[in-house]
Structures are given as C-alpha cells and as structure tokens.
Image: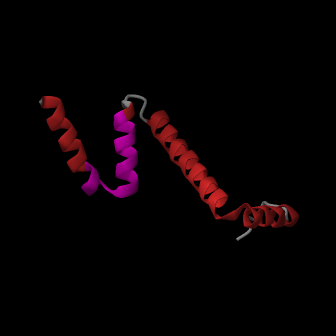
Amino acid sequence: MIPSDTDPAAADLQIRLLREAGPAKRAALTLELSAAVIEASRMAIRRRHPELTELEVKLLWAEIHYGKHLIDPVRAALRQDQLG
C-alpha cells in the first residue's frame, strides 16, 4: 500500500530498498519503528497526564493497548509489593 502523499517514484525506491535489505535488516527496521511508535504514544500520555510517574505512564500505556483486565492484576501486585 502506497501512502497517498508519497511520490510513486519514492515509494518504488522504498519498496526496492526494503526488498534488498533482507530479512534481518527488515526485522531490525520493524523493531526500531515499533519502539519509536511506542515511545511517541508514551510521550502523548506524559503530556496529557504530567502527574503520572514513569511506571504509571507505562501501566496506562499497557492498559490502553492490552486492556484493563490484564493490567489491574499487575497494579494490585505492585501495590502489594510496596506494602511489603
């Protein structure tokens, strides 16, 4: 799928370079892009909720992406650990 704002020649070049990169390089690029997107979404959470700690930002991010039902037990375990 070629983005509508990408020149067709540039899109062709991108596709050719990705094909030539090989599986290992494509996997590395995928991981880098994924990490960048995750960090950008966490930055958005930080901007919207400056009162949250870094751990709370990560927990909220996980809740948004994986669901409250999976993260609430993690929060409960963390509270239990803090209580000793």
60 drawn magenta: yes
Please indicate whether residue 36 sits to the left or right of residue 18 in the image.
left
Please indicate whether residue 27 sits to the left or right of residue 79 in the image.
right
- Point 28% across, 50% down: residue: 71
Q: At which x and y percent is residue 59? A: 34, 43
**Above/below status of 39 relative to 51:** below
Region rendered in magenta: 55-71
- Point 48% across, 41% down: residue: 42
Q: At which x and y percent is residue 66? A: 36, 57
Q: At which x and y percent is residue 45? A: 45, 40
- Point 24% across, 46% down: residue: 74
**Above/below status of 70 relative to 3:** above
Q: Quadrant of the N terminus?
A: bottom right
Please indicate whether residue 35 sits to the left or right of residue 76 in the image.
right
Q: Quadrant of the C terminus?
A: top left
How many marks on residues? Answer: 0
- Point 43% across, 29% down: residue: 50
Q: At which x and y percent is residue 60? A: 36, 44
Q: Main SS type for the magenta part?
A: helix
Q: Nearer the viewer, residue 8 or 77?
A: 77
Residue 29 location, quadrant: bottom right
Q: Residue furthest left?
A: 84
7 drawn magenta: no
**Above/below status of 3 relative to 54:** below
Please indicate whether residue 9 sits to the left or right of residue 1 in the image.
right
